[in-house]
Amino acid sequence: SECGSAHRRQRQPPPPRCLLASFRDTRPSLAAMAVVSNEAAQKVAEGLSKAWKDPKISERLRTEFASAQPFPHVMLRPFLGDAEFRAVREELQKVDATQKETDLFRFFQTQDFAPGGAERSPKRRRAESGAEASSTSGVAGPTALQTLCDFFGSADFRELCSGISQCGELSERVDLAAQIYPPGGHLLCHDDVIGTRKVSFIYYLTDPEEEWKAADGGCLELYAADRDGYPGTPANRPAKEVLPLSNALVFFVVEPGKSFHAVREVRGERARISIQGWLHAPSLEATKSPDMRNIATLQQILGPDAPSAAGALSDSAPAEGKEKAVDEDADGTRLSAEDIAHLSSWMAPEYLKDEQMREIAGHFAEQSYVMLTEILRKDVASEIIGALLEADREDGFGPDCKEPEVPQYEAGAVDGWSVVGPPHLRRFLQYPLQTAEAPAGGCHSKLGARMQHLAKELVGSGAFRRWLYACTQLEQRSAEPSLVRRFRPGMDYTVAVHASLATLERAELDATLMFTTDAAEAKDVWASEEVGGFECYLEADDEKTESVEAQEVYRGAMDEEGPLLNVPATCNALSIVLRDRRTLRFMKYLSRDAPSSRVDVSARFTVDAPEEESSDDGEPEEIAARSGAAEE
């Protein structure tokens, strides 16, 4: 068995790169865009000035928009003539973009394309210096891309959108950028309500040579509001998918608690390319349903006491109880011979030796976390791993399983397992700590029963709490009921939510016992973090989020500053992490390319934090347990 470190990592954003760099061998200079003829730009302008103004077409689009489900939206296709579309796409391939990744998304994005005459966002005003390489300015003569961007910022486009949607007055402000979702790119469920946004639009520039199919992923998922849930919560599965068809413009009105959407993970080898933009209302009061802004996705994520988020998060707690005080007894925190005997039926013997526990405690005191690999006995772990892989095969997640065209979000939600949402905050499968009926005998029931037994008899035992004290020297004041969770490839995640910190009166000790496939080749895949499934700890933003500008830049800083700690998915491992009220956590979206599902027991203990905590941001040393002997 080994005692190893998690990754304390500062993720530095990669340098700007060509928007299609993953799919091209060369990177032409932006100046090459000047070869585009003025004639192409003029054709774009002429087509845009005439298209979509026919009264009959406008009336049809208004009807389609108003009747669309699960909320009003419409697609205009073909938006440009074929030659003009291809001219814009060709120019876009020469524009630089930067990779963006947070708990919510992974994609590449250019800087703001908003035309010079349009009102600009606070984010662009800060970034515009030195941004020539990522903009459409500085090119000799007009281009098709510039002309299109100018149109998106024009009164004609605002009239088109407001006429179809009947959304009311729009200001001159437009936010505009190109985005590329390479394979693995995704955007989780949200409602787009930020600042004065009023209309969200996407112009798709995907490959015109072969029509985009559902199996390619990258679809715009539209979610209905959950009528039985808390206000402002979407249903657990999308009600509709919109394919990112080439030369199509899709738009909808941004509304809190209504306009829930996501971008499904891109599959295959082609990239999902688009120009994404927002038209704005002249004021917050002129946005759609301003009196409902308290239930907007961003407010639920950022608000420390957001009622919908707090209520939804509390609903995942096991029905048998919430937080409870840890029982005090005569032995206090001291491990007894009976404790060791109980733990020996579960845990690898190396971790029960005094010398090893002292070494773990020393490592934890320096770093405030530790990762213990091969924590359970091999016979115990092999039963759980076998049940997990069997469930994966039955649910279509095995390495030899054919991937369905559209994710089956209810996969694995059988024999006691249920889908936990809402998806703007999290999605995973959960198994209860108490079951009324005997296990059914199938692979899902077998996996659930074994994880349940592990949660109750090991992690929930007094012996484990006393062992945890020996390894951390932190006395637990209270304990939350453990959660048994399964994260499925291509579906599941959690989001960093400030409401989860609202109940923290003291520091918290997270103990997570996790399992994945034990295949040798999977270890490096998980460690790379490219397929997600890692638990990320990051510092909460102290800035107030009431202002429009603070809301608009909130997610932009996360990928620039980097996390405090990433804990990679590891088979048969226990991570122990100390965090205070200013530390958020989330489980990064698990890609469909992940080697297996991840199943874990997540336990939380309230503790008194030590007076001084380590501020070391370097890569921590690794220690190993081999029959109790430590190795550097």
Image (cartoon, grey):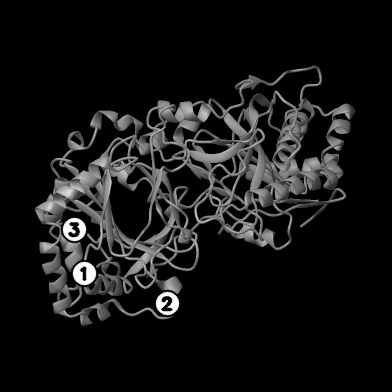
Element carrying mark 3? helix
Which mark is first along the chain, 1 or 3?
Answer: 1
The reply to whether callout 3 and callout 2 are in contact (CB within 8 Å) is no
- Mark 2: few/some/many CA within 10 Å (<14, 14-19, 20+): few
Residue 315 is marked as: none
Look at the picture and state if 154 lies above or below 352.
below
Question: What residue does disc 2 label?
Answer: 24
Which mark is first along the chain, 2 or 3?
Answer: 2
Residue 305 appears anywhere in the view = no
Q: Which amino acid type corresponds to the residue marked 2 in the rendered image?
A: Arg
Image coordinates of residue 44 in percent, x first then y, are: 16, 69
- Mark 3: few/some/many CA within 10 Å (<14, 14-19, 20+): many
Residue 81 is marked as: 1
Image coordinates of residue 364 in percent, x first then y, are: 68, 42
Element carrying mark 1? loop
The reply to whether callout 1 and callout 2 are in contact (CB within 8 Å) is no
Q: Which amino acid type corresponds to the residue marked 3 in the rendered image?
A: Phe
Question: What residue does disc 3 label?
Answer: 152
Image coordinates of residue 116 in percent, x first then y, are: 15, 61
Element carrying mark 2? loop
Q: Residue at horizontal 56%, vertical 27%?
A: 506
Residue 552 appears anywhere in the view = yes
Residue 122 versus residue 237: which sits nearer the camera?
A: 237
